[in-house]
Image (cartoon, rainbow, N blue to C red):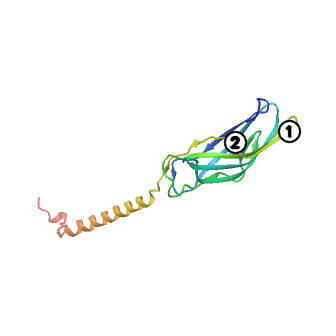
Amino acid sequence: MGLNDANAVGIRFSFATRTPWIQGERHEIVLTVDATPGSGVASIDLTTLILYLERPAMPRRDIVNSDLVLLESSGANRWISMDGPLVIYPNSDVTGSNFFLAVALSLNVYYTNGQTYGWGGWDPGIRIISPNIVPDYTPIGLMMVAAGSAGLIFTGLTWKSVRPNVPAVSKAERPN
């Protein structure tokens, strides 16, 4: 962003998360924002960031979930979330891979000529494909374990009941 190279500020977002995402579970995203100021920029102050989980829909996007965080400096021209990782909860109707992560950023730019520029809720227009969101198969897995255990118990009881009741023969009584 900026009218010329000297006043331009490059913004880079870095996301880190674990995959796959399971619907209904808490998913943390560690975010780092880096800025590359032009020669005419004295300083940059990034204040807030909103992360959206979106479903593309026509004529406008459908925001499924979001998280707002305050940003704090973690070095020269680098910011991280003040509150820890961003959190997204894909609810029960959110499955598949047709989702995007999008951001909106509030920032202030201070130029060497004394001018300032502030923008609240700047949407850079980037859409990042979200991790695949898979259904929660835990209930099905628990039912399969229960059914398997019941099957083993049934097989064991059946085997015990059909087994002939022959007394054990000691080694001394066996014929040669």
Which residue is disc 1 drawn over? 115
x, y percentage for residue 34? 71, 39
Q: Nearer the viewer, residue 132 or 1?
A: 1
Q: Quadrant of the C terminus?
A: bottom left
Labels 2 and 1: the sequence-earlier one? 2
Q: Secondary structure at mark 2?
A: strand
The residue lying furthest to the front in this view is 59
Q: Quadrant of the N terminus?
A: top right
Q: Is residue 21 left or right of residue 115?
A: left
Q: Secondary structure at mark 1?
A: loop
Q: Can you say whether 114 is above or below 138 in the image? A: above
Q: Nearer the viewer, residue 85 or 23?
A: 23
Which residue is disc 2 drawn over? 33
Residue type marked 1: Gln
Q: Can you say whether 5 is above or below 151 in the image? A: above
Q: Residues within 10 Å of mark 1 (few under 14, many from 20)?
A: few
Residue type marked 2: Val
Residue shown at the point (65%, 46%) measured from the top left: 103
Residue shown at the point (47%, 56%) measured from the top left: 136
Which quadrant would residue 113 be assigned to in this image? Answer: top right
x, y percentage for residue 37? 77, 34
* 3D distance between C-alphas at marks 2 and 1: 23 Å
x, y percentage for residue 28? 60, 51
Which quadrant would residue 124 be assigned to in this image? Answer: top right
x, y percentage for residue 83? 70, 54
